[in-house]
Image (cartoon, grey):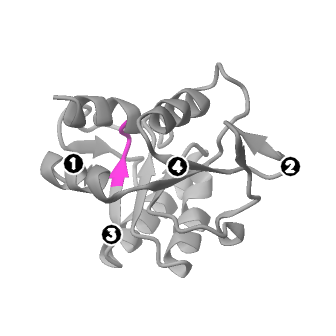
């Protein structure tokens, strides 16, 4: 199954209106991808809101245990959690009426499908985790959320916004 990501123009518009990015699963370790991406986005001027239980602070920002505990406006949820957590994360985003969710590349296990361009492979619907993740992402999109799957926020920002 292939999930159709928004076209580049829509992603550019998303970058233009986003100010606060909640990073779910942001590691306090500087060598982790979540830290590298969040630090880069912070340097580009975005406010990073770490969401990670049992951690007090990352990148100079207070950590929250979950999305529901965040006291600031969230414009985009950037996800660095395993695919089995996606249904619950989508439910939390929908309950909070958040506008956008970005699933970082490598989070959703690949199946056959496109790796380049707009299409992103999602797990085969026969797998329990895969079917729930696909259903959750489709629910988010149907509710009007902007959903980007299996792409790197930092790479797309550089590709689209620094030209």
Q: Which residue is mark 2?
A: 54
Look at the numbered disc 4 and give the secondary structure of its residue: strand
Q: Earlier in the sequence, mark 3 or mark 1?
A: 1
Q: Which residue shows up at 13% across the image and 50% down it? A: 9
Determine the residue positioned at 46% across, 46% down: 46
**Are circles 3 and 1 on residues that touch, CB within 8 Å?**
no
**Mark 4 or mark 2, which is nearer the start of the sequence?**
4
Disc 4 residue crowd, few under 14, some 14–19, many 20+, Cα 10 Å: some
Picture residue at 74% right of the left edge, 51% below the top: 63
- The span from disc 3 to disc 4 (Cα, nearest Å) is 24 Å
Q: Nearer the viewer, mark 2 or mark 4?
A: 4
Q: CA distance from mark 1 to mark 2?
A: 34 Å
User: Which comes sooner in the sequence, label 4 or label 1?
Assistant: 1
Q: Which structural element holds mark 1?
A: helix
In-front residue for pair 75/86: 75
**Mark drawn on residue 141:** 3
Span shown in magenta: 148-152
Report the disc number at residue 128.
none
Main secondary-structure element of the magenta-colored stretch:
loop
Residue at label 1?
A: 12
Q: Nearer the viewer, residue 79 or 161?
A: 161
Q: Is residue 75 visible?
A: yes
The CA span between labels 3 and 1 is: 18 Å
Tag 1–tag 2 contact (CB < 8 Å): no
Q: Quadrant of residue 86?
A: bottom right
Q: Nearer the viewer, mark 2 or mark 3?
A: 2
User: Left or right of 26: which side holds 48?
Assistant: left
Q: Give the Cα distance between marks 2 and 3.
A: 31 Å
Distance (Cα) linking label 4 and label 1: 17 Å
Q: How far apart are labels 2 and 4 at the CA level?
A: 21 Å
User: Residue 24 colored magenta?
Assistant: no
Q: Which mark is residue 47?
A: 4
């Amino acid at each position: 199954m292939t999930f159709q990501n928004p076209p580049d123009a829509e992603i550019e518009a998303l970058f233009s209106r986003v100010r606060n990015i909640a990073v779910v699963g942001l590691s306090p370790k500087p060598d982790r991808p979540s830290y590298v991406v969040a630090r880069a986005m912070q340097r580009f001027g975005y406010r990073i809101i770490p969401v990670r239980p049992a951690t007090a602070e990352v990148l100079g920002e207070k950590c929250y245990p979950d999305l529901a505990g965040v006291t600031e406006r969230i414009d985009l949820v950037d996800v660095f959690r395993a695919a089995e957590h996606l249904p619950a994360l989508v439910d939390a985003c929908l309950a909070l009426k958040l506008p956008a969710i970005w699933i970082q590349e490598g989070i959703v296990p690949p199946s056959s499908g496109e790796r380049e361009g707009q299409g992103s492979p999602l797990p085969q619907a026969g797998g329990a985790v895969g079917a729930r993740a696909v259903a959750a992402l489709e629910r988010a999109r149907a509710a009007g959320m902007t959903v980007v799957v299996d792409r790197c926020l930092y790479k797309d920002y550089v590709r689209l916004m620094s030209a």
